[in-house]
């Protein structure tokens, strides 16, 4: 609890330090985990204490005079009478913050993985002190909705953290008991949970707040108000969703004997239920090229786990997982400024296709405006500006971070006009002019206002890795590697003049001696012929390097070098990771061939009709950190012209300093060249659903990598911490999220108890779990807490009660067992969360109960059924017949039927009648079964025979599910409804056919005539939800039409 031991280490003085005598008590007696201490005057109930010289953590559970009874959460062997007991004055608490998900804790919130790493043992050493949340791990903190001077109260969200691929918006909230005026808010960046990210002041008292909260486990977290639950807890199990539904925020008990499948149902809830904080990860379309760590480009579907991709800092990123699936996609296209107002920004540059939940790395330029206006008859001065805020999406339950246009009004009626204007100007001056860097999901871009959208850009980055491939190619053909720069220049010229095809024609002006020297010196050693030709009266010459491969078939070295670099297809991608000076020489050659330089603005433009040349210029310039834009220009014949503009920068000056055309040369910049990321405007459009492919990068990275077009993109989530080997089964389970497999642990926190832990820790674990659940609920999420099993918790209560010599009740359990269970279950519910922005969350509690021998009259089961609203009773006989889920439809019940009627009316108005009729058929079948055992089936009426047959279909093909199959492990609600509709429809049609013909049509005739239809009814469960709702509904609708037609024909 808060790593209880770590909290104790922080809150309590060590026993060897100086402490007043009043702070100490002394051990009076020891009985297992129960310790009685004397001289404990001043202690409080549930106070945290440290017991003995090994400083064992305990909790005061009874006070009698100056004696206090303490339950100790560690092994008490070795404690002696007279050992010291140090009081703290504080309750037992847990730590709440980023890092909770994907973790496994023991009953007092000690992370098992950390303990295993420290102790190198599968056992938990006594007195080990490990933090519950990693204090060294840094999280990307994004402030939202709060600025200096704002008033903030408990529960207000002031930031978000990306925790993992399924918990992408971990809200950072002010603790419920805090409030004040904001005096400091941390900027966007990486912080640990121990770093101060917010400071407030209230009544002269300043408080510092981190991303972590500490909360007493036995105290329910406050809410604004509790609400009536109205949305079902959809589990994907037909017998539960159709007949005995629970609600989000409801309470459920699953009692059953050993082997009945309690754990399987719990895992199904964890895998498929909608009561969690699932959000979707972002990935790319098939064929998207990724920049690997070695500088090569690879299509994303060919990248494997263990390989490395390139980050924008030039360092590698380890790939640790590969999300896959199918989803609606969005096409992202770069838009650029045109050179004239008549031009339209069109082609070239960055583009990729991603899925709806892909996170775009964007930046919004700040825009501050101070204006005077009149509201009605009241003059006012208004300051408008951009700020990162968050809002709740009612449709999906997501918390969305979004830059919005905000305003602050200074009313002239409260101040004179001059004062109001000065206040507005002072406020405007206090707003940071720095651009706002943030991430937004592709599907949320359309939510931006027009002003924000116009000021929002994505980023492309220079390629900082340098891998000399050209020098290696020269070495292969036995040329001096010192020629690499000159050869790169010629390749740039060749690309510009002839699109890497044919001869290289270079125009020489009156002052082109240096250019001629460079050409001749290189041409002579690469087996190329040099032809000179005068250009009439212009006084210029054209030097042509004859590409002998194109003329007489003989090979020349320039062509073979280009081919070895992969440039035979006119692509210069191979040069993207060359040393900077090689890339600069290629770009200088390209500009000298077809470019223009404006020395006044230190910018350059290149015009070409070849798309490959355009792409080469853009790619090489951006890889050097040069801001580049592509615009369409005039047409050249039948082909459009593209104009590439390169803006002034030190990186461009370094390129132009290597030019040999006199009017292109610019002095080289002094010192090292700064190569920075640049922004590009973009458009988006939704396209058809298709397969997507993602990369998940290691936690040690910034989760961003580069595409081959140099766009900086966000990875598809990160894998959670590796789990302790003693609990490997659950963490290996996966859940299917929109067609892709994700580890359940991404959205799960496990509170487990090891076999060698004392019983007191088992008693505490249930409070640890419910407190963590309430914390996620307060973020506006729907949480399911699965307690497996509450019987073990009740047994812990019984043992402690026995050691306290309390009067035993039924089966030795304490008399307050029911009250303790009720206080636990009442912490479930749907609520309006404390603080702003307005959000709603819920905690659903599902308690598995293990009655001895499956006896439901067990005290724990009886007390639980008096509290919970849903009872999923598991039947040993059904389990023995391999009927799973083994939920007994005669014993089970749900009291949420009326609460869910509005939902069912909206979802499918027929569902309530279908469910009622299904229950009637099952009940009638039980009654008829007794008659059949006495007189045989042949004595039954024809309608009763139909009831028996339809009940068999319902039991075998509707209520039973195969959890190991792709088609039936999870059943969406629409599939559940349609299966039930056709089965009940068949029952009604068959019964009507028998009754309307006065017995002329019998069940035997229906069975013989419609054998194929009955088989299709039984086969409905084999329809795979992966085919999509539309396809399944069409097949089920066709079956319904066929049934009606067959019965109509039979009756005629």
Image: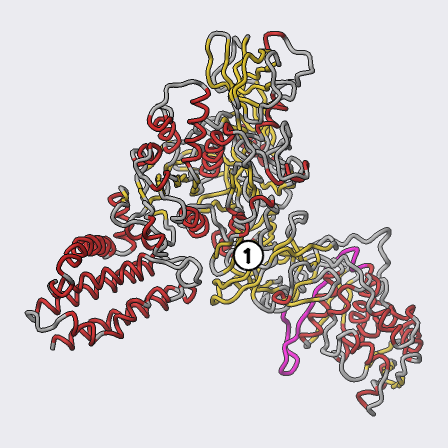
Report the number of discs: 1
Q: Image quadrant of residue 754?
A: top right
**Foreground residue, 24 or 562?**
24
- The quadrant of the rendering that contains the C terminus is bottom left
Q: Element type at marker 1?
A: loop
Q: At which x and y percent is residue 97?
A: 55, 36
Residue furthest bottom as drawn: 552
Q: Image quadrant of residue 1044?
A: bottom left
Q: Tell me, yes or no, whether the highlighted magenta stretch contains residue 495.
A: no
Q: Tell me, yes or no, whether the highlighted magenta stretch contains residue 635.
A: yes
Q: At which x and y percent is residue 403?
A: 53, 46
Q: At which x and y percent is residue 500?
A: 76, 79
Q: Residue at x 60, y 27 (%)?
A: 5
User: Left or right of 371: which side holds 642?
Assistant: right
Q: At which x and y percent is residue 358?
A: 55, 56
Q: Is residue 409 visible?
A: no
- The quadrant of the rendering that contains the N terminus is top right
User: Left or right of 415: which side holds 82?
Assistant: right
**Foreground residue, 606 or 548?**
548
Q: Is residue 943 above or below residue 388?
A: below
Residue furthest left as drawn: 998
Q: Residue at x 67, y 49 (%)?
A: 701
Mark 1 crowdedness (10 Å alpha carbons): few <14, some 14-19, many ≥20: many
Extent of the magenta region: 632-653
């Amino acid at each position: 609890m808060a790593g209880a031991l770590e909290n104790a280490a922080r809150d309590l003085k060590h026993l060897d330090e100086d402490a007043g005598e009043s702070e100490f008590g002394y051990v009076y007696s020891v009985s297992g985990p129960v310790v009685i201490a004397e001289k404990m005057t001043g202690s409080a109930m549930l106070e945290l204490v440290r017991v003995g010289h090994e400083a064992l953590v305990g909790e005061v559970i009874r006070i009698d005079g100056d004696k206090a009874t303490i339950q100790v959460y560690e092994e008490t062997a070795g404690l002696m009478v007279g050992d010291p007991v140090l009081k703290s004055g504080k309750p037992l608490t847990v730590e709440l913050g980023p890092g909770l998900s994907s973790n496994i804790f023991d009953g007092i919130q000690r992370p098992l993985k950390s303990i295993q790493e420290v102790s190198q043992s599968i056992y938990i050493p006594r007195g080990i002190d490990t933090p519950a949340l990693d204090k060294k791990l840094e999280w990307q903190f994004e402030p939202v909705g709060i600025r200096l001077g704002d008033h903030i109260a408990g529960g207000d969200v002031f930031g978000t953290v990306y925790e993992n691929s399924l918990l992408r918006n971990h809200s950072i909230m002010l603790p419920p008991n805090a409030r004040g005026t904001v005096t400091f808010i941390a900027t966007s960046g990486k912080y640990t949970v121990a770093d101060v990210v917010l400071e407030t002041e209230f009544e002269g008292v300043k408080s510092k707040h981190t991303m972590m909260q500490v909360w007493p486990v036995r105290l329910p977290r406050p809410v604004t108000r509790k609400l009536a639950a109205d949305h079902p807890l959809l589990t994907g199990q037909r017998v539960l969703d159709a007949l005995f539904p629970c609600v989000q925020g409801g309470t459920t008990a699953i009692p059953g004997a050993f082997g009945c499948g309690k754990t399987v149902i719990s895992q199904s809830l964890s895998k498929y239920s909608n009561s969690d904080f699932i959000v979707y990860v972002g990935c790319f379309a098939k064929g998207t090229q990724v920049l690997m760590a070695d500088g090569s480009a690879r299509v994303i579907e060919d990248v494997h786990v263990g390989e490395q991709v390139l980050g924008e800092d030039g360092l590698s990123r380890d790939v640790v997982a590969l999300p896959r699936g199918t989803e609606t996609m969005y096409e992202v296209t770069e838009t650029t400024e045109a050179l004239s107002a008549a031009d339209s920004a069109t082609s070239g540059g960055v583009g990729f296709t991603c899925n709806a939940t892909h996170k775009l790395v964007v930046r919004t330029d700040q825009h501050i405006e101070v204006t005077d206006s009149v509201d009605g008859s009241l003059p006012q001065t208004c300051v408008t500006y951009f700020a990162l805020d968050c809002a709740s999406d009612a449709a999906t339950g997501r918390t969305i971070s979004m830059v919005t246009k905000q305003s602050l009004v200074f009313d002239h009626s409260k101040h004179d006009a001059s004062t109001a204007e000065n206040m507005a100007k002072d406020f405007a001056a206090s707003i940071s002019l720095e651009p706002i860097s943030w991430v937004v999901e592709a599907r949320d871009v359309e939510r931006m206002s027009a002003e924000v959208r116009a000021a929002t850009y994505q980023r492309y980055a220079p390629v900082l890795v340098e891998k000399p491939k050209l020098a290696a190619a020269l070495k292969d053909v036995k040329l001096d590697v010192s020629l690499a720069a000159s050869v790169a220049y010629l390749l740039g010229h060749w690309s510009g003049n002839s699109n890497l095809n044919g001869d290289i024609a270079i125009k020489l002006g009156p002052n082109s001696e240096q250019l001629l020297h460079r050409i001749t010196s290189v041409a002579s050693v690469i087996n190329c012929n040099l032809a000179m030709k005068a250009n009439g009266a212009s006084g210029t010459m054209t030097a042509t390097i004859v590409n002998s491969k194109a003329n007489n078939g003989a090979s020349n070295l320039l062509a073979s070098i280009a081919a070895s670099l992969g440039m035979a297809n006119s692509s210069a991608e191979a040069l993207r990771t060359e040393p900077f000076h090689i890339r600069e020489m290629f770009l200088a050659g390209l500009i000298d061939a077809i470019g223009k330089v404006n020395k006044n603005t230190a910018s350059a433009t290149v015009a070409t009709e070849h798309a490959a040349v355009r792409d080469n210029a853009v790619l090489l310039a951006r890889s050097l950190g040069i801001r580049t834009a592509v615009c369409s220009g005039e047409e050249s014949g039948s082909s459009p012209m593209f104009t590439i503009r390169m803006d002034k920068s030190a990186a461009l000056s370094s390129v132009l300093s290597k030019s040999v055309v006199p009017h292109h040369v610019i002095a080289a910049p002094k010192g090292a060249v700064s190569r920075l990321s640049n922004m590009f405007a973009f458009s988006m459009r939704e396209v058809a659903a298709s397969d997507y492919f993602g990369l998940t990068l290691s936690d040690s990275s910034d989760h961003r990598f580069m595409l081959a077009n140099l766009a900086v993109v966000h990875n598809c989530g990160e894998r959670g911490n590796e789990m302790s080997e003693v609990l490997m089964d659950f963490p290996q389970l996966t859940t299917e999220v929109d067609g892709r497999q994700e580890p359940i642990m991404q959205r799960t926190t496990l509170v487990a108890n090891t076999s060698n832990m004392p019983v007191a820790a088992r008693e505490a674990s249930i409070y640890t779990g419910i407190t963590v659940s309430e914390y996620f609920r307060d973020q506006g999420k729907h949480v399911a807490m699965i307690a497996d099993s509450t019987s073990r918790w009740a047994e812990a209560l019984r043992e402690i009660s026995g050691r306290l010599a309390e009067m035993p009740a039924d089966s030795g359990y304490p008399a307050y067992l029911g009250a303790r269970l009720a206080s636990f279950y009442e912490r479930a519910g749907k609520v309006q969360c404390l603080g702003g922005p307005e959000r709603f969350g819920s905690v659903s509690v599902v308690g598995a109960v293990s009655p001895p021998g499956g006896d439901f009259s067990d005290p724990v089961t009886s007390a639980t059924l008096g509290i919970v609203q849903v009872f999923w009773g598991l039947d040993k006989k059904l389990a023995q017949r391999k009927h799973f889920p083994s939920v007994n439809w005669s014993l089970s019940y749900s009291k949420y039927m009326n609460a869910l009627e509005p939902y069912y009316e909206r979802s499918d108005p027929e569902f309530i009648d279908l469910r009622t009729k299904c229950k009637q058929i099952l009940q009638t079948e039980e009654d008829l079964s007794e008659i059949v055992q006495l007189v045989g089936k042949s004595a039954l009426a024809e309608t009763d025979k139909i009831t028996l047959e339809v009940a068999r279909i319902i039991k075998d093909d509707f209520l039973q599910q195969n959890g190991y199959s792709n088609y039936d492990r999870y059943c969406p609600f629409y599939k559940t409804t349609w299966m039930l509709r056709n089965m009940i429809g068949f029952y009604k049609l068959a019964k009507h056919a028998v009754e309307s013909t006065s017995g002329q049509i019998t069940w035997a005739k229906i069975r013989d005539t419609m054998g194929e239809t009955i088989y299709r009814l039984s086969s409905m469960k084999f329809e795979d939800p992966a085919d999509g709702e539309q396809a399944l509904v069409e097949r089920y609708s066709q079956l319904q039409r066929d049934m009606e037609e067959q019965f109509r024909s039979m009756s005629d």
